[in-house]
Structure formats: C-alpha cells, structure tokens
Image (cartoon, rainbow, N blue to C red):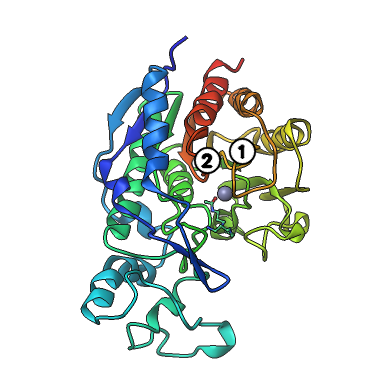
Amino acid sequence: MPLRVPFTWSDDCLRHDPAGEVWVGVRTPGSEVAARAEAIRTALLAAGARQVAAAPHDDAPLAAVHDAELLAFLREIWADWAAAGLPSDRVVPYVFAHRELTSSPRVPSAVWARPGSFVYDTMTLVGPGTWEAARAAVDVALTAVDLVVGGEPLAYACCRPPGHHALRSAFGGSCYLNNTAVTASELVRRLGGGPVAVVDIDAHHGNGTQELFAGRSDVRTASVHVDPGAGWFPHFLGFADESDEANLNLPLPPGTGDDGWLGAVAEAASFADGAEALVVALGVDAAAADPESPLVVTEAGYRQAGRILGALGVPTVVVQEGGYELATIGSLVVAALEGLETAE
Ligand code: SP5
Ligand code: ZN
C-alpha cells in the first residue's frame, strides 16, 4: 500500500553543511549532513508519499519559542565571522558563558567570543547557509502544522537540521532552532489551546523541548532515549527524576532493543493520551545500525512504534530529528510513518 501521508519539504534545508564537528578537541566529519534529508525524501517518494512545498511563515511562531538575541545571533554570526577574517571556516566557540562568568553586557564585542553566549558544545558549527537551512526547517514544520490544522490527520515534516536539543536562548547537539517545539507551540495556538503532547523517540533525550515547556500545562513532553547517566548526550539532562505531571523521561540502558524500547514508547503514548494533538519527534538514530547511539531497535520496531502512537487517534505532526546511517534512514522513516497511518 502506498504511503498516503503528505510530507513537507524545502530545498533550503540542504544549505547547511556542518563541514565537521569538534569532538574532544579534534575535528571529525560532520554527521548531520544534507544527504540525510535527501535519502529520506527519496524513500518517501518511492513509497508513494506526496511532497508538499514548504510555505514561508513569519517569525512570530519562532519568536514564541526562542529569545530574540539567539535568533539575531544565528541570523548574523556567519557574516560577522567571515568578515572578521578568522582562521576557521566555521563558527566554533573557544570560551563559554558559564552562568558564574557572566553579567552584563551578556554578549561579548569580540566576534570570536560571541558564540560562547549561545552555543553549548563544540559540535554544532555555523557556516554559510546554516541560518537559511535552520529557518527553512521551521517553515517545513509549520507547513506540516498548516496541513493538520487544515484537516489532514497526519503530516510529516522532512526537515533538517534537527531541533530537539535547541533551548530558548542557546543551541547545540546538531540543532539550531527547535522545530519540534515550534510545532507544538503553534498547534496549541491554532487548535483548542492544548494540551498538545510531544513524544520524542530520538535516541537522545529531547532536552531542549523539555526545558522549553517546563512549567507549562498546555504542552506535555515525553522522551524515550538512551540513559544519559550511561555516558550519552546530552549528558546533563534526561534522567527519570526530571519527570513530573507534564514531563516524562524514560531513559533506557545501552543495548536496549525492540522489547524494552517499545515498552517505553507505549508508556510515553499513555502519558500523551488525552491530548488534543500529538507531535512525534522522530529520530531514527535508536536503530541498531546507527553510529550515534547504542540502542538496537529494528525497522519493525519503528513500524510498531508508529502503530502505538497512531492508536492515540489525534491529529499528528511528525517532525524529523536525528538518524545518521544513510543506508537505512529512509526505510526507517517510511516504516514509522506506515505504522502511524495504519494504526487502529
Ligand atoms: C539530533 C541528534 O540526534 N543530536 C545528537 C547529537 C549527539 N552528538 C553527540 C556526539 C558525541 C560524539 N560522537 C562522535 C562522532 C564524531 N563525529
Ligand atoms: Zn539523536
């Protein structure tokens, strides 16, 4: 059966080329590459899904989620960095604005010091096209929201760079703008005021989304991920004891496969039950072949996760997050979407 789900797309998402990640001081090849999105799109078209061009949206939904200072930094830093004639071809922090280190003015005058006010790791570099791609990813997500608000039961935002590690005023984890959070926030505004549920099944904890909605009753967040306490990104957040009425963290040990993972997905789905709409933060990096996580979920596991979440029976926007194995990323996404649209 062909996939019926519409997916939203912008060629501008291809404009960000990480051109490396600085990990433990060493520049390694970037993992969050444009070929990821192209591989997913190819698989979707082959499965019969309908491509919908992203429509431009104004900045209001973005400004509802992120600080104006962060948005200005991301919009301007590449041009400032290039004009300063610095020796690196990408924006890389060398000093970090730890909270005990900063008072006003918060943003340093030196271009080379400024990234430390906004980025929390050395792996999420900015270059030419980064802003354009991140901003396009938000339009891709918002166009998927338009489809669901317009009556589609399910829509998929085929976007990159990913978003779930991005905070209100800082970015990291290969993420710049929190596409998932913008989607949830906009669904609250355009539907009945919530609650909207976010279920994040990326292999890594959705720390940005958790923190953005902390203390809000109109968005419930749940995340199924590899235990940060076992040594995995984002290291500082994602523990079970951060759970409360509006947030559920389900950390899993490295080596967890379909049984344990699907059990956690089912718990997250129960937590989301009763919401008026669902956002699935779909990372497929929990798959066994993925180089960025030690979870060993199968393609059948992703299909079943889709069925579990689809059974909630509420309007659903799926937003692409991580997933780095180019040979399998497309079929994993197709499997998850098949599960979502064939759920009973
Ligand atoms: C969206 C998403 O899945 N972000 C995950 C970011 C996790 N990155 C942590 C990388 C840790 C070191 N990996 C070594 C690979 C070097 N290229
Ligand atoms: Zn991930």
Task: State how far apart marks 1 and 2 are (Cα).
Answer: 7 Å
Number of dots carrying numbers: 2
Reading the image, the residue beneath label 1 is 289
Crowd class of label 2 (few under 14; some 14 to 19; many from 20; radius 10 Å): some
Marks 2 and 1: in contact by CB < 8 Å?
yes
Lower position in the chain sequence, tag 1 or tag 2: 1
317 or 110, which lies in front? 110
39 or 119, which lies in front? 39
Q: Is residue 161 above or below residue 267?
A: below
Q: Amino acid at mark 2?
A: Glu
Q: Which image quarter is the C terminus in?
A: top right
Where does the image place residue 319, in percent across and percent down from the top left? 47, 40
Residue visible at 26% across and 41% down in the picture: 11
Left or right position of 33 against 25: left
Where does the image place residue 258, in percent across and percent down from the top left? 73, 31
Left or right position of 299 against 191: right
49 or 41, which lies in front? 41
Mark 2 sits near ligand 1, with its Cβ under 8 Å away? no
Q: Amino acid at mark 1?
A: Ala
Residue at disc 1, secondary structure = loop
Q: Is residue 71 above or below residue 159?
A: below
Where does the image place residue 187, in percent across and percent down from the top left? 44, 41
Q: Which quadrant of the view contains residue 140?
A: top left
Left or right position of 327 against 275: left
Where does the image place residue 186, in percent across and percent down from the top left? 41, 45
Residue visible at 49% across and 25% down in the picture: 334
Reading the image, the residue beneath label 2 is 325
Q: Which quadrant of the view contains residue 8?
A: top left
Q: Is residue 49 visible?
A: no
Crowd class of label 1 (few under 14; some 14 to 19; many from 20; radius 10 Å): many
Q: Is residue 58 above or below residue 156?
A: below
